[in-house]
Amino acid sequence: MSALAKRIELPVEEVRVQKADDVLIHVRFSPSAEVLTIDRLPEGVAPKAWFERLFLSAAPYYRTLSNGRGFFRIPAEAFATV
């Protein structure tokens, strides 16, 4: 059996459908891994601190993208507790 014949199966959580009330927060990083921009940044909070706070409480909802980008797709109920 070759390696190509193996089927890759995603966990059920990966197939979750986006709901209209999900909160999307996009993040852009510099090549040195500093947070350049992040959505929904509360006033008076540094971008890095906001990312760390989100990641600590909502890590399962974070997805990494290419070119130094990523996003959180957090259900509204979970975002209310962040």
Image (tube, rainbow, N blue to C red):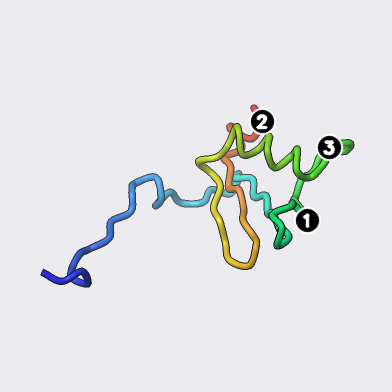
Amino acid type for the residue under numbered disc 3: Val
Q: Which mark is residue 36?
A: 1
Q: Residue at x 74, y 52 (%)?
A: 34
Of badges 2 and 1, the one in the foreground is 1
Instruction: Count neighbours of disc 2 (C-alpha within 10 A) and say few if under 14, some if 14 to 19, many if 20 or more.
Output: few
Q: Which mark is residue 77?
A: none
Q: Which residue is more in the foreground, 71 or 4?
A: 4
Quarter occupied by the C terminus: top right
Query: Residue 22 location, x and y as percent?
Result: 59, 45
Q: Which residue is more in the foreground, 37 or 16?
A: 37
55 lies left or right of 2: right
Provide the residue designation for mark 2. Answer: 82
Of badges 3 and 2, the one in the foreground is 3
What residue occupies the far front of the structure in this picture? 32
Amino acid type for the residue under numbered disc 1: Leu
Quarter occupied by the N terminus: bottom left
Query: Residue 33 location, x and y as percent?
Result: 69, 54
Query: Residue 71 location, x and y as percent?
Result: 62, 53
In space, the residues marked 2 and 1 are separated at their CA atoms by 21 Å
Query: Which structural element holds mark 2?
Result: loop
In space, the residues marked 3 and 1 are separated at their CA atoms by 13 Å
Earlier-in-chain disc, 3 versus 2: 3
Provide the residue designation for mark 3. Answer: 45
Query: Residue 51 location, x and y as percent?
Result: 70, 42
Q: Residue at x 60, y 48 (%)?
A: 72
Amino acid type for the residue under numbered disc 2: Val
Q: Residue at x 54, y 53 (%)?
A: 63
Instruction: Count neighbours of disc 1 (C-alpha within 10 A) and say few if under 14, some if 14 to 19, many if 20 or more.
Output: some
